Image (cartoon, helix red, strand yellow):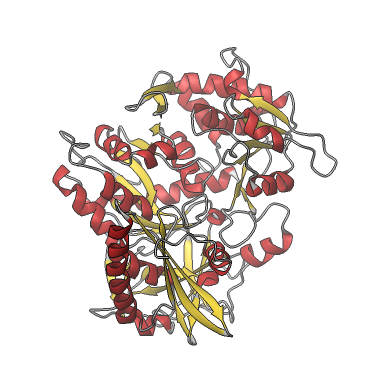
């Protein structure tokens, strides 16, 4: 498969299984219970080729084509047609009408597209971004749903040499301005084989018959893009899609689809486990059985044991098998997937001495910081490296996670210095027979213990309070166990010393008095929990409404943005 490509495999699917369903989009905006739109493999291939011909009327091989469309069939067609047209796809989120989107503007300036693919409903919001960049002609805007894609066109892509970069996956920008990761077809196919090999080893490293992808994750994020669009083509699976808004409005929709679809394969960030557990009722699942779920890949942010337990316990009465939750580590620079634990058992949770962990050493204990195992990575290669000396760290020592394999991308678009520092890591005096060069420096901190990988957080997010290191994910997990909501732990400088501040999202009660009573109780419990678990005290607990904490497009907390908002006094406090 590594010598093939998504366009070639899509042609093969259309030839061998033309009438099988390929993609189904469930539109919950039309009706509350959803209206389904399905394309077969043959229909998909025909429309992709037709749209690719439209794109090539305005773009040359290797030009960038930005996709700014809602999460529906038009987005799927636009992304796949970019491959077919031998241009470089740039998947993005649709900007809101009347509000300037700094991220979209930054990407447009960096990618300098020739074409923008959108829809009739979003064309007005996209129009302000279709401007000239550095003297180039303004990009042409094509409204996919207004084009006649029923006309049969001949594919020309096989007679051309495609660009080395298939698409640009722009990072979420949690700690910096967005950078476009250059992803190739080989990266995609290699990472698919690695992920399926690790996730589905008990099925011979292939998806079992009638595997169905179920996803609400946004297409402009790497996990949603690969799970929802790329993997179904590579695996020959039926993909059932809904929008992120449809999930957030009613998380039970996702859980219901896991029950009614055969051999459901899905993915989710950690926060969605909590959301689905809290807002899915017995009535929502009446008569349904979750025993056929194949796997729930849990990634994008550190997986919290309490969230896994809450989700599993909530759905246990509906025959949900806890072993199918698969905590996974990955990042866009590695295409997506890096590591997960062997299947067959529920997620493994190990408790480590908190004080030793903050000092950089892992020691198992009965009370302390609980972390989920990400297994023993085999492909790609994973090593823990001291970021300063670039020597491999001994087992049980916290260091930076480095990755090497065919899934690691070429670098960042138009960013030579960042590419060199991130993608060209060199291990000094490696301990075994491994490559010494071209390692991906992930920026994530972790360690190996008993050959299993554990993750503690981002290097850039490390909190230093009273001279000691603390991982914000750990503190956030401690507070979340009490508050049952999203939490951001940040370090803020005050008179030359760093102090801990926790931003805590809470659900408001019916009256102001009830809200204040609840906040007082939670504040006392949170203060005690932080002190007992981490040996420090929070200088300030900021209680805010749900949704107030800024997050990235993938749902990660933007901690630096939280610091800025806190310093400027811009959080609307419920406890004021």
Quadrant in the picture for the C terminus: bottom left
Q: In which quarter of the image is residue 371?
A: bottom left
Residue at image point 32% right, 74% down: 450
Whether 39 is drawn above or below 404: the answer is above
Which of 61/190 is in front?
Answer: 61
User: Farthest residue in the top direction?
Assistant: 151
User: Farthest residue in the bottom direction?
Assistant: 467
Q: From the top left corner, tell me how far across and down residue 417 is, in percent.
A: 72, 64
Whether 355 is drawn above or below 234: the answer is below
Q: In which quarter of the image is residue 318?
A: top left
Q: Quadrant of residue 40?
A: top left
Q: From the top left corner, tell me how far across and down residue 85 is, in percent.
A: 66, 29
Which of 464/550 is in front?
Answer: 550
Residue at image point 59% right, 12% down: 151
Q: From the top left corner, tell me how far across and down residue 336 is, in percent.
A: 49, 52
Whether 60 is drawn above or below 329: the answer is above
Q: From the top left corner, tell me how far across and down residue 393 is, in percent.
A: 48, 79
The answer to whether residue 346 of the structure is visible from this angle is: no
Residue at image point 55% right, 63% down: 565
For this view, does 155 lie left or right of residue 225?
right
Q: How many marks?
A: 0
Which of 338/322 is in front?
Answer: 322
The answer to whether residue 491 of the structure is visible from this angle is: yes
Whether 575 is drawn above or below 14: the answer is below
């Amino acid at each position: 498969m590594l010598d093939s490509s998504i366009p070639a495999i899509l042609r093969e699917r259309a030839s061998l299984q033309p009438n099988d369903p390929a993609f189904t989009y469930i539109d919950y905006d039309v009706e509350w219970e959803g209206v389904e739109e399905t394309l077969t493999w043959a229909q998909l291939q025909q429309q992709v080729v037709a749209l690719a011909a439209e794109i090539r009327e305005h773009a040359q091989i290797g030009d960038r084509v930005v996709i700014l469309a809602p999460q529906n069939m038009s987005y799927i067609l636009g992304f796949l047609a970019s491959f077919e047209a031998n241009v470089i796809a740039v998947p993005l989120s649709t900007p809101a009408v009347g509000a300037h989107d700094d991220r979209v503007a930054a990407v447009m300036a960096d990618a300098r597209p020739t074409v923008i693919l959108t829809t009739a409903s979003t064309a007005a919001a996209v129009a302000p971004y279709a401007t000239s960049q550095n003297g180039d002609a303004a990009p042409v805007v094509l409204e996919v749903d207004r084009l006649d894609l029923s006309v049969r066109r001949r594919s020309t892509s096989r007679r051309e040499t495609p660009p080395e970069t298939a698409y640009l996956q722009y990072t979420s920008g949690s700690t910096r301005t967005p950078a476009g990761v250059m992803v190739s077809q080989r990266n995609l196919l290699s990472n698919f084989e690695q992920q399926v090999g690790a996730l589905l080893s008990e099925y011979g490293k292939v998806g079992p018959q009638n595997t169905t992808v179920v996803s609400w994750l946004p297409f402009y994020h790497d996990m949603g893009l690969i799970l929802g669009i790329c993997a179904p083509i590579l695996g020959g699976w039926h993909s059932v899609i809904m929008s992120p808004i449809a999930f957030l409005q009613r998380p039970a929709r996702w859980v219901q689809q896991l029950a009614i679809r055969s051999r459901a394969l899905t993915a989710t960030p950690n926060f969605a486990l909590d959301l689905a557990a809290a807002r899915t009722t017995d009535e929502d699942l009446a008569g349904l059985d979750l025993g056929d779920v194949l796997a729930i890949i849990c990634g994008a942010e550190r997986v919290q044991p309490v969230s896994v337990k809450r989700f599993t316990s909530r759905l246990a009465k509906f025959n949900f098998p806890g072993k199918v939750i698969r905590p996974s580590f990955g990042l866009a620079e590695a295409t997506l997937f890096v590591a997960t634990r062997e299947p067959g058992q529920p997620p493994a949770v190990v408790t480590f001495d908190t004080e030793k962990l903050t000092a950089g050493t892992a020691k198992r204990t009965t009370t302390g910081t609980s972390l989920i195992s990400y297994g023993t990575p085999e492909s790609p290669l994973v090593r823990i490296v001291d970021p300063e000396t670039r020597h491999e760290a001994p087992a049980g020592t916290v260091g930076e996670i480095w990755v090497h394999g065919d899934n690691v991308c070429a670098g960042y678009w138009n960013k030579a210095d960042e590419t060199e520092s991130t993608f060209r890591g060199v291990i000094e005096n490696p301990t075994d027979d491994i490559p010494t060069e071209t390692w991906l420096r992930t920026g994530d901190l972790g360690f190996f213990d008993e050959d299993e990988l554990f993750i503690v957080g981002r290097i850039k997010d490390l909190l230093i309070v009273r001279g000691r290191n603390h991982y914000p994910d750990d503190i956030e997990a401690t507070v979340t166990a009490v508050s049952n909501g999203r939490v951001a732990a940040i370090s803020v400088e005050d008179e030359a010393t760093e102090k801990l501040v926790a931003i805590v999202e809470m659900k408001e009660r019916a009256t102001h008095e009830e809200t204040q009573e609840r906040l007082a109780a939670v504040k006392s419990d949170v203060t005690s929990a932080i002190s007992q678990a981490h040996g420090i005290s929070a200088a300030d607990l900021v209680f805010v409404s749900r949704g107030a904490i800024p997050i990235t497009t993938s749902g990660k907390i933007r901690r630096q943005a939280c610091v800025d908002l806190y310093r400027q006094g811009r959080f609307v406090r419920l406890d004021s």
